[in-house]
Image: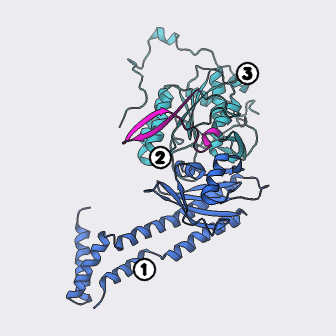
Chain colours: A blue, B cyan
């Protein structure tokens, strides 16, 4: 018997999703290039977990790359919080001067950078997360050009994060959590038990035609 | 939708012959406006300035006294505005306040905090903060932030107009990225982006709006939480330079409308061809 549920899952996955490894590689390459361009000690992408109100390290290169991925902190405070909430980039030197920032950062990440460039990852009206570039050379003065460049990186990283978020939502719908795709999978599975692929195809085509005619 | 902060209850928008004779400002503009006439000798004394941001660290050596500090929050879907007991949760509002204080040392500074716990992406908090500031009648309102959410555009637009008609000058930061955000794009506010020069009083008019003015915004020494200073870059920091300059103008010419202050900024900008520098 053909496992139509699995085939549907595979088909949707192949058509819509990349796997986690590909996503990690995509984000990893973005932070690596960002770090290289700005000659920084570290770069990271943080994703907003809206339900928890937290920012989560998704990709890290350089200082902290072995320990930071998966770590979380409140999305309403600090420099990353300001950038996320106001959707504006922020470039700061010598953040170690701020005792509160240093203490919070050291406690949560074990690494206190001196300088931060942070840009919101905007997808339409939403802020999906923050891209941070940490510790550029001490004598490097910021220019408008660099701020613009950081913004461009932010747009690229946001596109990647949007894909990943969409993939995770789809994966969740196909998994044990239920949802429309799961139900569709069950229908396809029952049809497969009753006949050959042509019956399944005919049913899906007629369903498609019906949906096309249905009022939005 | 709730009403704008204020609608003046005027009986009619027309004047009779006698009233026309009384239509004059407190002083006449000179034939050739100079920066000296606009703000020379002013310390911002008499001007009330409000910073809508992450809060202000009162008592910071570069900020000094903050006369009023409020915080906006949402409790059970209701907007609550109450005295701010937490101060600056980021450092950004303190940075803006320090720049304003540097330029207009004797202005009155107030804070309304629109960031904080549970505020993630909350447009209503930003709108409520601006509404409160307009309702308090501040001379100048610094907004080094914006919202990208289109559903708040109409309400923000009404508020910006309400401020304009109530003589509150809203100085708003242009976005640093190529995205649509508000309120800086409204013509009733003064919008600001950065230039790379190091002079805090160097401002330029932009002949190609929507951004209307450029001020110092790159590698600026700013006040930050913990009583410290650091260097920072962004339109966020260009904006309070123009806010401070508006406070100087308002301190010297309290009767000028927002439109007149904007005109004066344009006439005294470094690229205006006058004596701007």
Q: Which residue is mark 3?
A: B41
Q: Any mark on residue A14, and which?
A: 1
Chain of the residue under label 3 = B
Q: Horizontally, is A74 left or right of A113 in the view?
A: left
The residue closer to the viewer here, A113 or A159, is A113
List x then y, in percent, for residue A106: 65, 56
Range shown magenta: B67-94
Q: Is residue B43 above or below residue B150?
A: above
Q: Which residue is mark 2?
A: B119
Question: Which of labels 1 and 2 is toward the front?
Answer: 2
Same-chain status of marks 3 and 1: no
Rendered residue at 52%/25% (across/down): B167
Label 3, residues with CA under 10 Å away: few <14, some 14-19, many ≥20: few
Report, in whole angstroms, how far the alpha carbon at label 2 lies from the one at label 3.
Answer: 41 Å
Task: Name the residue furthest top.
Answer: B18
Rendered residue at 52%/49% (across/down): A76
Q: Quadrant of the N terminus of chain B?
A: top left
List x then y, in percent, for residue A180: 29, 69
Report, in whole angstroms, how far the alpha carbon at label 1 lies from the one at label 2.
Answer: 37 Å
Same-chain status of marks 1 and 2: no
List x then y, in percent, for residue B274: 73, 30
For the question of whether residue A90 can be seen, the reply is no
Tell me which corner region of the image, top left, top right, bottom left or bottom right, holds residue B207. top right
Disc 1 element: helix
Label 1, residues with CA under 10 Å away: few <14, some 14-19, many ≥20: few
Q: Is residue B45 above or below residue B95?
A: above
The residue closer to the viewer here, A80 or B128, is A80
Rendered residue at 42%/18% (across/down): B14
Q: Any mark on residue A117, and which?
A: none
Question: Which of labels 3 and 1 is toward the front?
Answer: 1
Label 2, residues with CA under 10 Å away: few <14, some 14-19, many ≥20: many
The disc, 2 or 3, on the residue closer to the chain's N-terminal end is 3
């Amino acid at each position: 018997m053909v496992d139509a549920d699995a085939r549907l899952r595979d088909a949707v996955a192949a058509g819509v999703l990349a796997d986690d490894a590909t996503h990690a590689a995509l984000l990893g390459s973005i932070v690596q290039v960002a770090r290289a361009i700005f000659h920084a000690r570290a770069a990271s992408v943080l994703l907003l977990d809206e339900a928890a109100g937290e920012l989560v390290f998704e990709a890290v290169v350089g200082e902290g790359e072995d320990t930071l991925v998966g770590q979380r902190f409140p999305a309403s405070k600090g420099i990353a919080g300001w950038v996320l909430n106001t959707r504006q980039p922020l470039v700061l030197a010598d953040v170690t001067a701020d005792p509160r920032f240093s203490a919070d950062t050291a406690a949560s990440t074990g690494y206190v950078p001196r300088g931060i460039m942070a840009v919101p990852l905007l997808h339409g009206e939403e802020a999906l997360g923050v891209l941070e570039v940490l510790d550029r050379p001490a004598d490097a003065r910021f220019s408008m050009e660099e701020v613009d460049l950081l913004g461009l990186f932010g747009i690229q990283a946001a596109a990647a994060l949007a894909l990943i978020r969409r993939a995770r939502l789809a994966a969740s719908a196909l998994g044990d959590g239920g949802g429309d795709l799961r139900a569709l999978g069950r229908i396809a599975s029952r049809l497969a038990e009753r006949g050959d692929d042509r019956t399944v195809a005919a049913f899906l085509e007629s369903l498609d035609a019906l949906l096309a005619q249905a009022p939005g | 939708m709730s009403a704008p902060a204020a609608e003046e209850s005027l009986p009619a928008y027309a004047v009779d012959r006698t009233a026309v004779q009384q239509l004059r400002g407190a002083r006449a503009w000179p034939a050739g406006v100079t920066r000296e006439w606009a703000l020379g000798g002013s310390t911002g004394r008499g001007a009330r300035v409000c910073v809508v941001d992450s809060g202000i660290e009162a008592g910071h050596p570069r900020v000094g006294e903050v006369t009023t500090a409020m915080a906006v929050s949402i409790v059970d879907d209701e907007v609550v505005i109450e005295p701010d007991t937490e101060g600056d949760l980021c450092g950004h509002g303190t940075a803006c306040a320090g720049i304003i204080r540097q330029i207009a040392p004797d202005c009155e500074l107030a804070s309304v905090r629109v960031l904080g716990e549970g505020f993630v992406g909350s447009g209503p908090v930003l709108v409520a903060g601006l509404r409160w500031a307009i309702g308090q009648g501040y001379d100048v309102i610094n907004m080094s932030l914006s919202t990208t959410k289109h559903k708040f555009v109409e309400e923000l637009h009404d508020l910006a107009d309400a401020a304009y008609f109530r003589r509150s000058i809203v100085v708003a930061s242009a976005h640093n990225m190529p995205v649509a955000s508000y309120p800086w794009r409204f013509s009733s506010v003064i919008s600001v982006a950065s230039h790379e020069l190091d002079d805090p009083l160097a401002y330029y008019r932009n002949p190609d709006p929507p951004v209307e003015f450029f001020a110092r915004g790159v590698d600026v020494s700013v006040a930050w939480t913990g009583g410290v200073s650091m260097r920072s870059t962004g339109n966020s920091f260009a904006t309070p330079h123009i806010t401070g300059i508006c406070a100087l103008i308002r301190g010297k010419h309290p009767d000028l409308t927002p439109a007149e202050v904007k005109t004066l900024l344009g006439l005294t900008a470094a690229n205006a061809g006058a004596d701007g520098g």
